[in-house]
Image: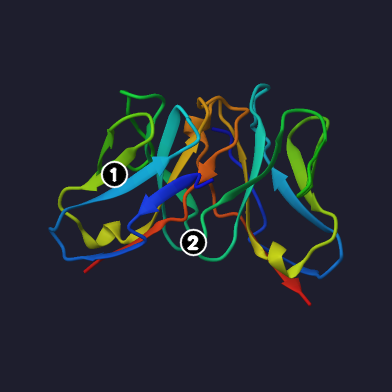
């Protein structure tokens, strides 16, 4: 399982874009990059995932570096409801190895 | 659409007591997982079941047993609870466990062992 590194915490203002970084320098060529978030007192929820190309969905965008050693989760306009812990993980060959690190605690200021 | 349902939501046990955490999914998924989350530790995989009839150990299996009762249900049993097992437990499922799939999580069981 490729090791990932994320900042412990980040802060943003409401309605501003947020860029959450993740380093995964030992990722293998077939590992997907997954992002999940966990709101207070809830289970984690899927945000987005990708392999090589940048990905967009209704929640966020995922920008993957050309060498795949890093990625950035982009929330285009942060809301108070986006305050959560965001986890970045590589799949390590299958979902069975999708363990989670400590993630980034995102605080959104009104 | 219920998704992944866990019961109970809260439980307090005394050291040495046993209990079973229940998990059920209604999405016809083949793969199911049990995680524990401790403060500042992220989520750690306890056991997983790739498909009905199979189970395998994850990162922290000691002190736990699991049963994949059928395709829908995957239970986690603590035979003799210890204070070190105080944690929040999450069940998850996915279609077939491949690396491109997303996981669906339940809302968790908060367990305290005194």
Please tell me whether mark 1 sits on a helix, a strand or a loop. strand
For disc 1, the marked residue is: B76
Classed neighbour count for the residue bearing mark 2: other residues with Cα under 10 Å, few (<14), some (14–19), many (≥20):
few
Residue furthest left in the image: B16
Residue drawn at x 85%, y 55% as measured from the top left? A76
Return the x and y of residue B72 as percentages of the image width and height: 38, 34
* Closest to the observer, A71 or B23: B23
Give left or right: position of B43 versus B9. right
Which image quadrant: the N terminus of chain B?
Answer: top right
Give left or right: position of A101 versus B67. right
User: Mark number for residue A78?
Assistant: none
Real-space CA distance between mark 1 and mark 2, rounded to the nearest whole angstrom: 23 Å
Classed neighbour count for the residue bearing mark 1: other residues with Cα under 10 Å, few (<14), some (14–19), many (≥20):
many
Return the x and y of residue A11 as percentages of the image width and height: 74, 68
For disc 2, the marked residue is: B40
Q: Earlier in the sequence, mark 1 or mark 2?
A: 2
Residue drawn at x 42%, y 35% as measured from the top left? B32
């Amino acid at each position: 399982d490729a090791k990932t590194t994320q900042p412990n915490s980040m802060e943003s203002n409401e309605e501003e874009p947020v860029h959450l970084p993740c380093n995964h320098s030992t990722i293998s060529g077939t590992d997907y990059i997954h992002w999940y978030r966990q709101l207070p007192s809830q289970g984690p929820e899927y945000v987005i995932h990708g392999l090589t190309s940048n990905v967009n969905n209704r929640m966020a965008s995922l920008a993957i570096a050309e060498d795949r050693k890093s990625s950035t989760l982009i929330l285009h306009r942060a809301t108070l409801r986006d305050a959560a812990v965001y986890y970045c993980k590589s799949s390590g060959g299958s979902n069975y190895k999708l363990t989670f690190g400590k993630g980034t605690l995102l605080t959104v200021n009104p | 659409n219920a998704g992944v349902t866990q019961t109970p939501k809260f439980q307090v046990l005394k050291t040495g007591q046993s209990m079973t955490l229940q998990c059920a999914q209604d999405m016809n998924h083949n793969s199911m997982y049990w995680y524990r989350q401790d403060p500042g530790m992220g989520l750690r995989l306890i056991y997983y079941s790739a498909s009905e009839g199979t189970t395998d150990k994850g990162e922290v299996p000691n002190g736990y047993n699991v049963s994949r009762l059928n395709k829908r249900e995957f239970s986690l049993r603590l035979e003799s609870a210890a204070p070190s097992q105080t944690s929040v437990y999450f069940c998850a499922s996915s279609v077939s466990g491949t690396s491109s799939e997303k996981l669906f999580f339940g809302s968790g069981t908060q367990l305290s062992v005194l």
